[in-house]
Image: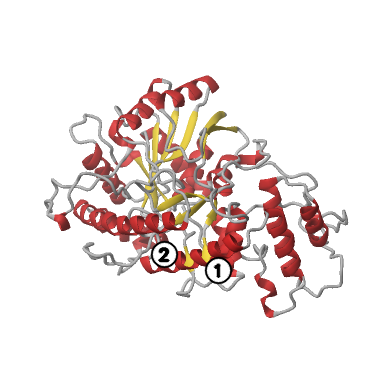
Amino acid sequence: MDQPSERPTIKQRKSVKFSDDTECPTAVKSRLCESFEMYLKYHHEKSENTNQASKQLGLSNGEEEEDPFPMFRRVEKTGVIFATAMAKERGFHPEDPTWANMGQGAPECEALPDAPPRDYKMDISFEEMEYAPTTGITALRDKVATYYNHLYRQGKQSQYKAENVCIVPGGRAGITRIMAVLGETQVGFFNPDYTAYEQALGLFMRLTPSVYVHKDVNEAFMDPDEFEFQTVGRGVGTVLLSNPCNPTGQSIEGDNLEKYVDIARRHNVAMIMDEFYSHYYYDSDAVAPADGGADDDTNWPKTVSSSKYIDDVNKDPILIVNGLTKNWRCPGLRLCWVVAPAPIVELLGAAGSFLDGGANAPSQHLALPLMDLEFIRRDTWALQRHFKLKRDYFLKELEELGIMVVNKPNATFYVWADLSNLPAPLNDSLLFLSECTRHKIICVPGVFFDVNPRGIRHIKKSMCNQNVRFSYGPPMQNLVVGIKNLKEIINKFKINPMRASVYVKTMTGNSLHDSREGALRQTFCAPSTDTSHLVDDE
């Protein structure tokens, strides 16, 4: 995303000088600088308050020191890492029940009511310690192909085979492989969409990112006719999108999804469908076995995939990215796949040989029982029933708090909330996060979903600044704690609202002059040190 004027370089940040003799740890100063820069990046605000804050942080003194690592570039944190790092500095620990982590992009992994048992025990043979093929072991590729054929392609002549499946070590690894094998082309993407697309689309200079902008960031999806008009008019060669959408929880399905696939086929546009949340649907007419529905292969819960509308699996330019991370609730396995025409899978295997080396073999063998169709059917029923209860509870509580949700999410485990009606500064997503972490809540500011690869888009102020993504992926108790803490925050600022620039100035000043142990827990505190212990979302 485009950079604010006078933004300090890495060299300038190393020589932070303060306007007084305040005793404040160097790490705190560095973290304040990083987070204040993030605020300016999405606001481009010039005021007396922000100017004073800049001077107090030493961001406008122009002094420089030699950068000890000039051969490296700065890499910004993704939204989840940024938010979790801020919370970590305020005492967050995953096992602390007083914290509500509603920012995590992972579902709860514990056993669910009525779900089939899982056996994660395994004996690893000597043969499994060998490298697996960069496209994955054949047994798992076969099971993935069977899954798509059974759920979405019954009665169709063209069927998926193992040669159409590439097993990858995580969803982002799959997307990166795809970006690596694309030629010189425009790659269309939507806003808002998954935060990591920004880095993936910006890695390879031969790719020209091209944004599809919703007229309203709360819009459910783009009409197929508008999608075709923009795709053909721009000469886009590839489109990347999440469906269901992370962060909005909206879904393209039925006739609309069929039209999207048809547009890609007719205009020979490669469509990369990120279907990681395709099991998380809540509003279908299907009757669960727990509610009296049939408990056999004739009764499957609603799931959605573009594979249903593909004519020829080896000719239609549709690539599907999915995996065990979300739909199977096994994020720790980092085991996913790309389903595509066989010639493209061959390219992906070649890219894997120099990018990631492939998924580890023991995990692939461990995953085989998870791909049995009967297990998938029963597990998905249990998943949908459990997560629907959490979604409905969370939406009801947000409404009572005055936090708007323009479009009810019918999929994923996210809520794309609109903060516009909250008192200032809570109607600013970055400052909302700041205040949330002070009250033991984690969420992800909407600005991180305003995807801007390589900063190619000129952005004066992010169109997602008033939005925030909440996750109801964690257990229910997590949500109960979060709602309780949110009430405290909102009541506080209903009584004493504060303009954003004043909030920034006040909290920055208080942090620098706080000599207590809590000095590390200031408002803007994303650490510049090791964040490898933090967990990002797919």
Badge 1 or badge 2: first in the primary sequence: 1
Question: Residue 385: image x %, image y %?
Answer: 26, 56
Q: Residues within 10 Å of mark 1 (few under 14, many from 20)?
A: many
* Vertical order, 236 against 481 (above or below): above
Say the numbered circle drawn on residue 479: 2
Q: Camera-side residue: 109 or 460?
A: 460
Q: Identify the residue shown where x is 36% and y is 54%.
A: 324
Question: Residue 361: image x %, image y %?
Answer: 38, 58
Question: Residue 6: image x %, image y %?
Answer: 80, 47
| Figure label count | 2
Q: Is residue 460 left or right of residue 472?
A: right
Q: Secondary structure at mark 2?
A: helix
Identify the amino acid type marked 1: His
Where residue 69 sits, quadrant-wise, is: bottom right
Q: Which residue is mark 1?
A: 439
Image colouring: secondary structure
Q: Secondary structure at mark 1?
A: loop
**Residue 183 in view:** no
Residues under labels 1 and 2: Cα distance?
14 Å
Question: Residue 380: image x %, image y %?
Answer: 26, 53
* Vertical order, 477 against 399 (above or below): below
